Image (tube, rainbow, N blue to C red):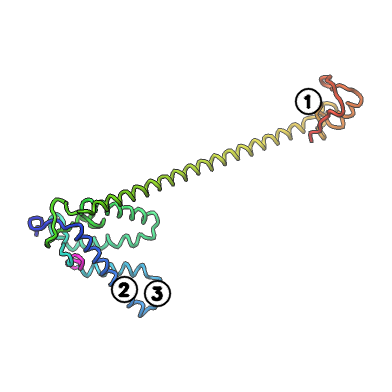
């Protein structure tokens, strides 16, 4: 049966009321299932399996309403029904929608995937507030839009009313959160670059230090030009030439000039290097 000839798109307010009503019924089903399981398995078992019970409650509610070809209680409450390409939704598409509804419940423990799913849900909600169609992603993906047979009808997507302001507010909030997230990412990257630079500078400093120590060690292994042996307690004369301390001290006591350059040499001017 084609609906577009007889019915108009449902108002956004009616779709939201239907969704809220369905959520309250899902909570009632969950409460009854919790009480039943608690009676047989105890409170500890219920606490451990709370997430699975929440999924089970939604599945039971959806399968016993739209899963058998009927409308949900919330849809009946506001007298709306969903169609696809102006035709009634078949059982297969209804079951696909049930699956689409429970997948996010499994994704809550998947880290980044859950975050991306939440972002997509917010973007979908913004579109709904602006255009009044497809309250959740599952209906958008399956092309399930609502028409109404009650007095609350609308044509040409003029059914959003003041909800567009909610869409603007939500879009502004999402944009602000995105800017903050980008700034945090930029700061983390800048910090990472600084840490890398510090590590590189520290390694270069250590390398220079090692080269200096090796250079000093090499110089200390240079032979004394007086005894022709390795330098022992190296000492520098005023002119800069280096000898063994004992050798240059004895030389200075006998001669007042450097044995290499004949510059003035005084014992009190000798500088012990090590």
- Find disc 2 in the rendering and name its residue: 31
Q: Is residue 147 left or right of residue 169?
A: left
Please report the bounds of the magenta region as a residue range.
68-75
- Find disc 3 in the rendering and name its residue: 45
Q: Residue at x 63, y 37 (%)?
A: 207
Q: Residue at x 92, y 24 (%)?
A: 254
Residue found farthest to the right = 254
Task: Specify which label sits upstream in the sequence, 2 or 1.
Answer: 2
**Quarter of the image containing the N terminus?**
bottom left
Helix, strand or loop under label 3: helix
Rendered position, 246 above or below 263: below
Query: Cβ–Cβ below 8 Å for labels 2 and 3?
Result: no
**Dot 1 crowding, Cα within 10 Å, few <14, some 14–19, many 20+:** few
Say whether residue 66 is visible. Answer: no
Q: CA distance from mark 1 to mark 3?
A: 87 Å
Q: Residue at x 20, y 67 (%)?
A: 72
The numbered disc on residue 240 is: 1
Rendered position, 61 above or below 146: below
Q: Is residue 148 left or right of residue 45?
A: left
């Amino acid at each position: 049966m084609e609906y577009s000839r007889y019915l108009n798109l449902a108002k956004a307010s009616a779709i939201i009321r239907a969704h809220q009503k369905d959520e309250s019924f899902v909570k009632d089903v969950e409460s009854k299932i919790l009480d039943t399981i608690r009676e047989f398995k105890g409170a500890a078992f219920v606490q451990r399996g709370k997430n699975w019970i929440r999924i089970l409650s939604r599945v039971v509610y959806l399968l016993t309403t739209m899963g058998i070809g009927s409308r949900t209680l919330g849809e009946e409450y506001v007298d709306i029904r969903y169609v696809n390409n102006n035709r009634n939704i078949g059982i297969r598409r209804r079951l696909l929608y049930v699956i689409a509804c429970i997948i996010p419940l499994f994704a809550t423990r998947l880290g980044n995937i859950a975050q991306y799913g939440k972002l997509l849900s917010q973007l979908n909600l913004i579109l709904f507030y602006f255009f009044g169609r497809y309250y959740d992603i599952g209906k958008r993906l399956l092309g399930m839009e609502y028409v109404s047979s009650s007095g609350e009808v609308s044509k040409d997507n003029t059914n959003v009313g003041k909800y567009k302001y909610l869409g603007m507010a939500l879009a502004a909030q999402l944009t602000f959160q995105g800017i903050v997230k980008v700034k945090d990412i930029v700061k983390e990257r800048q910090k990472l670059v600084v840490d890398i630079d510090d590590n590189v500078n520290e390694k270069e400093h250590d390398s220079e230090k090692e080269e200096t120590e090796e250079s000093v060690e090499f110089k200390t292994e240079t032979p004394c030009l007086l005894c022709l042996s390795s330098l022992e307690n190296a000492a520098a004369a005023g002119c800069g030439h280096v000898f063994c301390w004992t050798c240059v001290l004895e030389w200075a006591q006998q001669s007042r000039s450097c044995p290499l350059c004949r510059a003035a040499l005084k014992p009190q001017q000798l500088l012990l290097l090590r």
